[in-house]
Amino acid sequence: GPIRYLPGFTQHFLNGKTYTSRELLARARAAVEEIGKGKKVVVVDGVGYPAVGSICGTSNAEVAYALGAPVLLVGPAGVGDSLDSFNMMRTFFEAHRVRVLGSVLNKGNAKNMKGMTSGELQAFLNGAIGRYAPSCCVFGVVPEMSLQDLDLEQRTETVVRN
């Protein structure tokens, strides 16, 4: 990708030995425009948590703003942690004038979902999120699984695709 945080990058950036923030964001825009030619949708995957790269002026929020892209947050499954994490991430993106669509919860399991089904947890969290972010919603829960949980055909497809 056009922005990569390899070991030593931050130090090089701060010492003026890399592209500037403006140049890095322009490179990201150019890459997305090139990939997006002839496509209706382009999914841009951020790196780590929302503020990664902020010291360089290229946090996930700054990149999303430069691209004019709304954001779908991926956070932990569960009740309290998912709401707290969503709220923290949402406010960071909104502070950078980026529209947050909602969230997908990752690694849902019986323990963190408190015995609720994915649909029940989704409905419960949508009610809670509606109190402070009425335009956002939880789109779903990705179940926690290991490669052993998949059958042999699915495992082969997963390994080949990755």
Image (tube, rainbow, N blue to C red):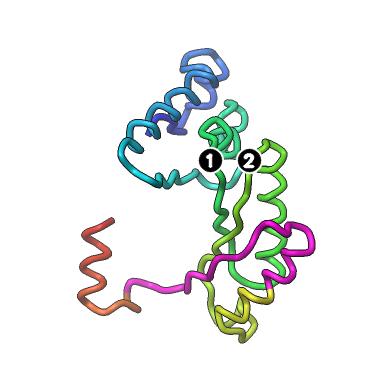
Residue 83 placed where, x, y %? 70, 64
Residue pointed to by mark 2? 98
Q: Position of residue 28 (x, y in %)?
A: 44, 29
140 falls in the magenta region: yes
| Residue 158, x across and y down, in percent | 27, 64
Q: Answer with left or right where residue 154 lies relative to residue 95.
A: left
From what the image shows, is residue 139 above or below residue 57? below
Classed neighbour count for the residue bearing mark 2: other residues with Cα under 10 Å, few (<14), some (14–19), many (≥20): many
Kindly state the secondary structure of the residue where label 1 is placed: loop
Q: CA distance from mark 1 to mark 2?
A: 7 Å
Instruction: Answer with the quarter of the image where residue 135 lies.
Output: bottom right
**Along the polypeptide, which appears first: circle 1 or circle 2?**
1
* First to last magenta residue range: 125-147
Identify which residue is drawn at 54% across, 23% down. Answer: 11
Q: Which residue is farthest bottom?
A: 115
Disc count in the image? 2
Depth check: 30 or 155 in front? 30
